[in-house]
């Protein structure tokens, strides 16, 4: 039965509440998938003739969702058959389950109980970043049925574009809608799942009227307010003369040009001194094969099927002379890190430079082809002065303005700086740059090795060894890895072992498991020289027994033990969350909590405002929750991805991370959210990962490390 009355509802039986659970309709509706990553395929199928295919990529986990009507305070069982690597099934805000790999169909099952007042839940299935395509079939949600209500009529219908034969439309999403019907002149012309549609095959120079309605399993809404659109003429006119012609660059043999687009143009002719030298479809062109130190005059015209416009106003460009010139003096020289025996420097690239000379106290101590250098073999607690010059085949520039740096003291291995930059080093190979541990820049004060593995024969215990693919790729041995830890120690850096990660399946849920965890981590510290442990259990944590394990580890390792945590954003929304409870349980031995401010969407801040990830407000307003919830400022850090490729969402420029740190430390450089008090001891920042930072030209460490070092 289908009701067409607005506001009508359907009570659902205590059976499978999922609509299109086996995708046998041949379409996704009412499922929606992120980034157009979902599709319905004929093979493989668990039963019937269709299944869902989710194409996970480096930047999208291919999450597909459906909102289901449920009843408050009721128990539900969610299950599905899946195939592929790292496939997840769950209900948003409730439980989830996953499999690291299913070569054939495998059933995943999880259960949850709705809270008071809950009338709908969003179920989801997704893969994981860069793990390839997964498949899902026969999704089931069993429990007492709720009610599904006809969605409201869509609003905001507008015309977004026209041609001589098409009209493009868009509108606002309707709550609860799983699809939309598009009407032209009162007749339905299409059904779509998104909020846009292009109507094609129309007559030129003709007006059309459109409305849309919203649909779901309960029925169809009333139609929206109408909009009208008129298709364009089928007889084009000659486009106007291009404007804005300018020279955008020169070399000794080329001149680059650009101009503004002309309405209706399908191409452009480029003229040099009145003679046509090129025809292009875009709004830029580089004229090559020219003579050095020579001036040339250019115009452009616009073309389409109706003809060619008049030529534009001319511009003149002059090619440069042959042969290099001495590069300019480097700017931006800064200290990015110090240890008891080294100073790390970075500077801005000089145009035309092929190398750089580094001077200490006026004496050249090194050369570099890049824009960073670490001076080693220095004396502890000593101040040094540095300058750099740029070089190429034409000669050497003047030296830069000098900067000073003081090496750290030799006070042992237990302490970290007041402000700390933490980075994760990947013990596996993916799209990021693989690195030996010794290649980690000195600007990273604390390096977390990702990750230890669960010991299947020892509940709660962990093991560690170099990933075989990484070892093969880098020709890297376990002995070299241990030696590299010693190298980092000699620079004053600390190295800890991280436990968990997105796919970590380590469970510490009993006193016996807590003992096994403490003993195994302490064994790794003694074997490899790790300075502590990082807790990154993204699939749940038992605050009582993990707290017991960490206190036991502290009693073994002593006061120099470093303990960090990297909870997901949702895990630190309130002190009632297990991760937050764990942090408070071990506050007496906790070093830093670096909450992951990414891959989380929008979240509440400490002022109950809703903030979107990827903004300064998101970092500061959510860090405020930890600060107001009982952690000391020196136990709070900001966790961010090192590049856009490092996470599915939440990347911000490193300079914005610096602004957030200043906002929390001194209430300066804030966005619209300003904390009620300043926290000068805010501990610092963390990034996933050092390898992704390398892939991104070291932008994270080169920007944030010197800023942290300069903070009071």
Image (cartoon, rainbow, N blue to C red):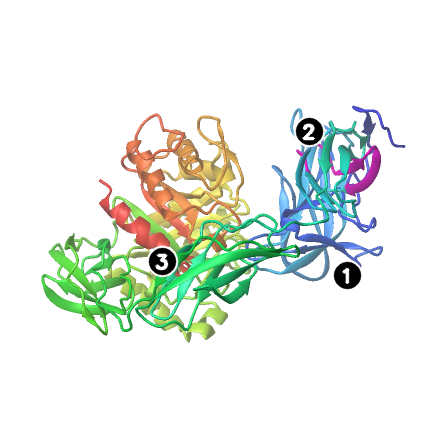
Mark 1–mark 3 distance (CA, rounded to whole Å): 43 Å
| Label pair 2/1, CB-CB below 8 angstroms | no
Q: Where in the figure is residue 289, as x and y percent of width and height?
A: 41, 73
Near-viewer residue (5 or 439): 5
Mark 2–mark 1 distance (CA, rounded to whole Å): 39 Å
| Label pair 3/2, CB-CB below 8 angstroms | no
Magenta span includes 232:
no
Q: Where in the figure is residue 593, as x and y percent of width and height?
A: 39, 42
Q: Where in the figure is residue 99, as x and y percent of width and height?
A: 63, 55
Is the residue marked by circle 3 packed among few (<14), some (14-19), or many (20+) residues within 10 Å? some
Q: Is residue 701 above or below residue 69?
A: below
Q: Where in the figure is residue 358, as x and y percent of width and height?
A: 18, 65
Question: Where does label 3 land, which residue?
Answer: 698
The quarter of the rendered structure image containing the N terminus is top right
**Left-right relation of 91 to 23:** left
Q: Tell me which segment is drawn in magenta.
A: 170-191
Is the residue marked by circle 1 packed among few (<14), some (14-19), or many (20+) residues within 10 Å? some
Looking at the rendered structure, the secondary structure element under dot 2 is loop
- The numbered disc on residue 44 is 1
Magenta span includes 179:
yes
Of tags 1 and 3, the one toward the viewer is 3
Q: Quick check: can you spot residue 705?
A: yes
**Left-right relation of 590 to 325:** right
Is the residue marked by circle 2 packed among few (<14), some (14-19), or many (20+) residues within 10 Å? some
Looking at the rendered structure, the secondary structure element under dot 3 is loop
The quarter of the rendered structure image containing the C terminus is top left
**Left-right relation of 391 to 668:** left
User: In the rendered structure, which disc, 1 or 3, sits on the residue that comes first in sequence?
Assistant: 1
User: In the rendered structure, which disc, 3 or 2, sits on the residue that comes first in sequence?
Assistant: 2
Question: Where does label 2 land, which residue?
Answer: 155
Looking at the rendered structure, the secondary structure element under dot 1 is loop
């Amino acid at each position: 039965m289908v009701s067409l009355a607005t506001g009508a509802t359907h009570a659902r039986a205590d059976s499978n509440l999922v609509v299109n659970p086996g995708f046998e309709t041949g379409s996704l509706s009412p499922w929606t998938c992120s980034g157009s990553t979902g599709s319905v395929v004929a093979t493989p199928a668990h039963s019937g003739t269709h299944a869902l295919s989710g194409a996970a990529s480096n930047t999208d986990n291919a999450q597909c969702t459906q909102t289901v009507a449920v009843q408050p305070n009721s128990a539900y069982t969610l299950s599905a058959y899946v195939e592929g690597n790292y496939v997840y099934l769950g209900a948003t805000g409730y439980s989830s389950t996953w499999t690291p790999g299913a070569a054939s169909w495998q059933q995943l099952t999880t259960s949850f109980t709705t809270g008071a007042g809950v009338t709908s839940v969003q179920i989801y299935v997704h893969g994981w970043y860069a793990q390839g395509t997964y498949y899902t079939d026969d999704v089931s949600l069993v429990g007492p049925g709720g009610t599904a209500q006809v969605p409201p009529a869509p609003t905001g219908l507008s015309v977004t574009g026209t041609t001589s034969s098409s009209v493009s439309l868009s509108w606002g999403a309707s709550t609860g809608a799983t699809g939309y019907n598009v009407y032209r002149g009162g007749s339905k012309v299409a059904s779509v799942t998104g909020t846009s549609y292009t109507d094609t095959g129309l007559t030129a120079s003709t007006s059309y009227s459109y409305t849309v309605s919203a649909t779901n399993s309960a029925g169809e809404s009333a139609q929206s307010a109408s909009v009208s659109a008129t298709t364009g003429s089928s007889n084009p006119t000659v486009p106007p003369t291009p404007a804005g012609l300018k020279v955008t660059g020169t070399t000794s043999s080329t001149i680059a040009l650009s101009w503004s687009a002309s309405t209706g143009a399908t191409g452009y002719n480029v003229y040099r001194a009145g003679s046509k030298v090129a025809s292009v479809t875009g709004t830029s062109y580089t004229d090559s094969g020219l003579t050095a130190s020579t001036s040339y005059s250019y115009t452009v015209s616009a073309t389409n099927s109706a003809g060619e416009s008049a030529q534009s106003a001319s511009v003149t460009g002059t090619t440069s002379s042959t042969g290099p010139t001495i590069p300019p003096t480097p700017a931006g020289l800064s200290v990015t890190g110090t240890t008891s025996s080294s100073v790390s420097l970075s500077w801005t690239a000089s145009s035309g430079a092929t190398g750089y000379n580094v001077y200490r106290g006026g004496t050249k101590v090194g050369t570099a082809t890049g824009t960073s250098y670490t001076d080693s073999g220095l004396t502890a607690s000593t101040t040094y002065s540095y300058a750099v010059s740029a070089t190429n085949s034409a000669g050497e520039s003047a030296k830069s303005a000098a900067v000073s740096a003081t090496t750290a003291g030799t006070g042992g291995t237990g302490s970290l700086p007041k402000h700390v930059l933490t980075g994760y080093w990947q013990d596996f190979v993916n799209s990021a740059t693989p690195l030996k541990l010794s290649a980690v820049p000195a600007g990273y004060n604390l390096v977390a090795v990702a990750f230890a593995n669960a010991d299947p024969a020892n509940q709660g215990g962990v093991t560690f060894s170099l990933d075989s693919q990484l070892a093969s790729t880098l020709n890297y041995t376990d002995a070299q890895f241990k030696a590299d830890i010693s190298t980092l120690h000699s620079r004053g850096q600390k190295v800890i072992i991280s436990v968990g990660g997105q796919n970590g399946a380590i469970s510490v849920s009993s006193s016996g498991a807590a003992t096994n965890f403490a003993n195994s981590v302490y064994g790794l510290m003694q074997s490899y020289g790790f300075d502590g442990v990082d807790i990154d259990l993204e699939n749940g944590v038992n605050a009582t027994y993990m707290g017991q394990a960490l206190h036991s580890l502290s009693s073994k390792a002593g006061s120099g033990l470093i303990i960090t945590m990297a909870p997901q954003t949702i895990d630190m929304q309130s002190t009632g969350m297990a991760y937050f409870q764990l942090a408070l349980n071990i506050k007496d031995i906790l070093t830093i909590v670096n909450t992951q401010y990414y891959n989380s969407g929008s979240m509440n801040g400490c002022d109950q405002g809703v903030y979107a990830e990827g903004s300064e407000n998101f970092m500061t307003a959510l860090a405020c929750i930890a600060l107001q919830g009982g952690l000391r400022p020196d136990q709070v850090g900001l966790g961010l991805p090192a590049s856009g490729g490092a996470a599915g969402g939440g990347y911000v420029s490193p300079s914005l991370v610096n602004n957030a740190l200043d906002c929390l430390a001194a209430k300066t450089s804030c966005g619209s959210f300003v904390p009620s008090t300043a926290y000068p001891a805010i501990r610092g920042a963390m990034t996933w990962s050092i390898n992704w930072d390398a892939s991104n030209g070291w932008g994270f460490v080169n920007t944030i490390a010197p800023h942290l070092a300069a903070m009071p």
